[in-house]
C-alpha cells in the first residue's frame, strides 16, 4: 500500500491552499475539542492543536499516511482572537483592529504514520489595519461574510482592502496553511512536492 497524503481539516480554505502543490490528497476532519486551556500561551495552544488534529486523524485512517494539520490564531492586545461566528462579533473585532496591528500565528504539523515522526513549524504574520469607518466595516462584513475566519477577514479576497500593511515570510500562513513550511515538512517526511 502506498503512502497517502491527508489534510486533517474540513476547511475549504486549507484545501484550496494545499491543492496548489498539485499532490493528490484527501481531507479528513478531526473530531476534537479545540478549547484552550485556562491561561494557555497562544504558541503552546497552536502547537497542541496541530498535533492533536494530526493524531486524531491518524486514528481514523489506515496507515501508512502523511498527515498535515494546521491551526491558526490571532493575537491582539495580549488576547487570543478567534473566529467571530456572528456578524456583530465580526464588526466588533474589525472596529477594535482599526489603526492597529494584529499578529497571526499559524502552526503546521506533518505526521508520518509509517515512521511515527512529526515535524512542526510556526509561521508569524502581522497585519496593520488602516483607519476604518464603521460603515466600511459593515459593508465589508456584508459582502464577504468572514464569520468563519480568525480576525474577521479574508486576506485572499476583499479583506485586503482593510489593510495598511502586511509583514511576514509566507503570505499563505495568513490564509490558514503556511505552504513554505508545509513543503519543508513534507520533504522531511519523505514527500517532495516537486518529485
Image (spheres, helix red, strand yellow):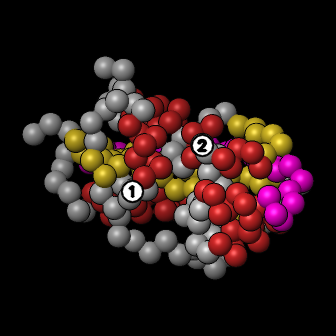
Q: Nearer the viewer, residue 128 or 124?
A: 128
Check disc 2 and report its element: helix, strand or loop.
loop
- At a point 42% along the width and 52% down the height, the residue shown is 12
- At a point 62% along the width and 35% down the height, the residue shown is 170
Q: Nearer the viewer, residue 167 or 68?
A: 167
Give the residues in magenta: 112-136
- Crowding at dot 1, Cα within 10 Å, few <14 / some 14-19 / many 20+, comes out as many
Image position, residue 64 (x, y; %): 19, 45
Quarter of the rendering occupied by the N terminus: top left
Taking the view exactly as shown, the residue that stands out farthest to the left is 1
Is 65 a magenta residue?
no
Image position, residue 149 (x, y; %): 58, 60
Question: Residue tagged by mark 1?
Answer: 9
Residue 111 in view in this figure: yes
- At a point 39% along the width and 71% down the height, the residue shown is 32
**In which image quadrant can residue 77 be found?**
bottom right
Image position, residue 11 (x, y; %): 43, 56
- Crowding at dot 2, Cα within 10 Å, few <14 / some 14-19 / many 20+, comes out as few
Name the side, left or right, on which 32 lies relative to 28: right
Residue 40 in view in this figure: no
Q: Which of the two discs, 1 and 2, labels the residue nearer the N terminus?
A: 1
Question: Residue tagged by mark 2?
Answer: 156
Check disc 1 and report its element: helix, strand or loop.
loop
Quarter of the rendering occupied by the C terminus: top left
Name the side, left or right, on which 154 lies relative to 18: right
Whether residue 75 is situated above or below residue 123 in the rendered picture:
below
- At a point 40% along the width and 46% down the height, the residue shown is 15
Amino acid at each position: 500500500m502506498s503512502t497517502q497524503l491527508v489534510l486533517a481539516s474540513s476547511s475549504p480554505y486549507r484545501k484550496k491552499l494545499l491543492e496548489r502543490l498539485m499532490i493528490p490528497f484527501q481531507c479528513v476532519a478531526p473530531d476534537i475539542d479545540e478549547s484552550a486551556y485556562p491561561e494557555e500561551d497562544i504558541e503552546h495552544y497552536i502547537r497542541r492543536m496541530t498535533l492533536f488534529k494530526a493524531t486524531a486523524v491518524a486514528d481514523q485512517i489506515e496507515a501508512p499516511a502523511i498527515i498535515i494539520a494546521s491551526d491558526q490564531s490571532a493575537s491582539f492586545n495580549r488576547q487570543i482572537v478567534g473566529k467571530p461566528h456572528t456578524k456583530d462579533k465580526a464588526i466588533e473585532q474589525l472596529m477594535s483592529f482599526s489603526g492597529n496591528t494584529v499578529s497571526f500565528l499559524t502552526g503546521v504539523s506533518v505526521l508520518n504514520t509509517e515512521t511515527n515522526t512529526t515535524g512542526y513549524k510556526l509561521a508569524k504574520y502581522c497585519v496593520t489595519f488602516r483607519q476604518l469607518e464603521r460603515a466600511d466595516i459593515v459593508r465589508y462584513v456584508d459582502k464577504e461574510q468572514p464569520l468563519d475566519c480568525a480576525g474577521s477577514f479574508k486576506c485572499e479576497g476583499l479583506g485586503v482592502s482593510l489593510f495598511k500593511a502586511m509583514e511576514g515570510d509566507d503570505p499563505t500562513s495568513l490564509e490558514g496553511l503556511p505552504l513554505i513550511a508545509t513543503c519543508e515538512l513534507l520533504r522531511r517526511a519523505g514527500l517532495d512536492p516537486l518529485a
